[in-house]
């Protein structure tokens, strides 16, 4: 039996999921030099946190079967603290894992196909449009791309050199995940074609070649990063003068590629709102979200759907397809009773938080205890320290704990940072002003 790998020797720079961050063609604001390997945790390499071991489970596209959801519920009860954390990449985290539980967790994941390759489990970072094929938008399902890309990643020895933070984004054409700053982004287009984007370069390929093109792009990134010698983990960390030569790599891989139209500026990703969505075939999908991105094992079991599939979104929500109209209404009511956010009017809609105290040694406050519900406007994210682990993309309200026992409030986004005055005792009012875009 394979033993769990020991924890990394140093605390990862981001105990929560690395923020997706970045815009197409963006480079780091200053040269990034990495003098160590990425310490991002996985299912086998656990991170030692103040509340026990932490495992991060990569779930490509956030796609799960009912059986796998049950396995995660069992894992949370048997090996963790009874809850599952949902990350900003649609992955899952288990916290509070005991010292001798790593082997049992690994066995459970193997038997339910949640870990098809032990050597590659940290590099299976793929986000995908969560409503693809369900609501009539975009260009159909992304399942073939997801399956093919995941299989290609797990079949190559060299892909294990990718950082646990390197991200593939698969967009069905609606633009929801294209703006999430993926290192390699595939965008489905009509007419059997796709766009592949790496940094500032976008090319057109046949849709059937898209997964192989994404793999080739990752290979080109590794070659470029090695040549740069700065230890870059992601495309945007490459220094000036070391751009990925996507066209040359696709040619070497025998993948025909052509010029793409000048891409529009990627819009800020807009998460789908909780509720029910009707597809063109008359079936419904139910969209819900857990409060502050954590679900109990009982809540997980309540998600099991008639279609046998559950999708986790990059916005810490769930999509459950396969209902008729009445069934969708009934399931939304049931999930509301179970504690999920089931509509945009919920006071917890758009409110997120990092782990905070007592689980994170670097946190200055118990942000989950302190977090306040709100009403509409910009998303709000509560952070226990200035690392702001797992914060959202786009414009958002930043509520960060400070060393003096208070919180600082700011609006962050593509336009930079705007700090808001927050006198002691007026935190709720400051957040409400910030959500509404008022100084």
Image (cartoon, rainbow, N blue to C red):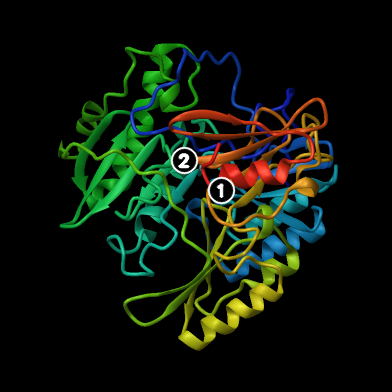
Q: Quadrant of residue 241?
A: top left
Residue drawn 22% across the image and 26% down it: 248
Label 1 environment density (alpha carbons within 10 Å; few <14, some 14–19, many ≥20): many
- Name the foreground residue: 380 vs 77: 380
Q: Is residue 409 left or right of residue 412?
A: right
| Residue 43 in sight here | no
Residue drawn 57% across the image and 65% down it: 345
- Name the foreground residue: 44 vs 378: 378
Q: Which residue is mark 2?
A: 394
Q: Position of residue 187 (x, y in %)?
A: 29, 48
Callout 2–callout 1 Cβ contact below 8 Å: yes
Residue drawn 43% across the image and 52% down it: 270
Q: Is residue 132 left or right of residue 379?
A: left
Q: Which residue is mark 1?
A: 379
**Which dot marks residue 242?**
none
Q: Is residue 333 left or right of residue 62?
A: right
- Name the foreground residue: 414 vs 168: 414
- Tell which circle, 2 or 1, labels the residue nearer the N-terminal end: 1
Q: Position of residue 131 (x, y in %)?
A: 41, 63
Quadrant housing the C terminus: top right
Label 2 environment density (alpha carbons within 10 Å; few <14, some 14–19, many ≥20): many
How many tags in the picture? 2
Residue drawn 62% across the image and 62% down it: 112
Dot 2: element: loop
**In the orientation shown, which residue stands out farthest toward the bottom?**
326
């Amino acid at each position: 039996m394979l033993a769990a790998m020991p924890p990394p020797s140093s605390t990862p720079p981001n105990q929560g999921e690395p923020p997706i961050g970045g815009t197409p063609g963006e480079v780091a604001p200053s040269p990034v030099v990495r003098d160590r390997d990425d310490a991002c945790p996985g299912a086998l390499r656990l991170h030692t946190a103040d509340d026990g071991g932490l495992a991060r489970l990569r779930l490509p596209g956030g796609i799960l079967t009912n059986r796998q959801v049950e396995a995660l519920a069992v894992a949370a009860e048997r090996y963790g603290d009874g809850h599952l954390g949902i990350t900003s990449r649609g992955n899952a985290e288990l916290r509070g894992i005991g010292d001798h539980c790593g082997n049992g967790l690994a066995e459970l994941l193997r038997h339910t196909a949640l870990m098809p390759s032990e050597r590659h489990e940290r590099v299976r970072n793929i986000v995908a449009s969560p409503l693809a094929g369900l609501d009539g938008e975009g260009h159909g399902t992304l399942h073939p791309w997801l399956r093919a890309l995941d299989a290609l990643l797990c079949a190559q020895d060299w892909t294990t050199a990718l950082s646990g933070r390197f991200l593939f984004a698969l967009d069905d054409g609606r633009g929801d995940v294209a703006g999430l700053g993926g290192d390699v982004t595939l965008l489905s287009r009509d007419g059997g074609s796709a766009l592949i984007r790496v940094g500032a370069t976008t090319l057109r390929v046949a849709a059937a070649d898209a997964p192989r093109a994404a793999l080739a792009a990752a290979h080109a990134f590794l070659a470029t990063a090695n040549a740069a010698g700065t230890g870059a983990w992601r495309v945007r960390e490459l220094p000036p003068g070391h751009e990925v030569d996507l066209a040359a790599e696709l040619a070497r891989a025998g993948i025909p590629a052509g010029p793409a139209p000048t891409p529009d500026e990627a819009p800020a990703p807009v998460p789908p709102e909780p509720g029910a969505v009707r597809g063109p075939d008359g079936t419904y999908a139910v969209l819900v979200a857990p409060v502050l991105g954590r679900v109990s094992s009982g809540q997980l079991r309540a998600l099991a759907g008639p279609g046998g599939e559950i999708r986790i979104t990059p916005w810490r929500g769930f999509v459950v397809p396969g209902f008729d109209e009445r069934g969708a209404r009934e399931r939304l009511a049931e999930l509301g009773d179970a504690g999920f956010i089931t509509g945009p009017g919920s006071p917890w809609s758009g409110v997120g938080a990092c782990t905070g105290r007592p689980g994170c040694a670097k946190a200055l406050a118990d942000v989950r205890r302190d977090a306040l519900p709100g009403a509409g406007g910009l998303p709000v994210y509560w952070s226990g320290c200035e690392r702001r682990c797992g914060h959202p993309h786009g414009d958002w309200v930043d509520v960060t704990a400070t060393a003096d026992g208070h919180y600082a409030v700011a609006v962050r986004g593509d336009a930079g940072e705007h700090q808001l005055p927050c006198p002691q005792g007026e935190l709720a009012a400051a957040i409400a002003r910030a959500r509404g875009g008022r100084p």
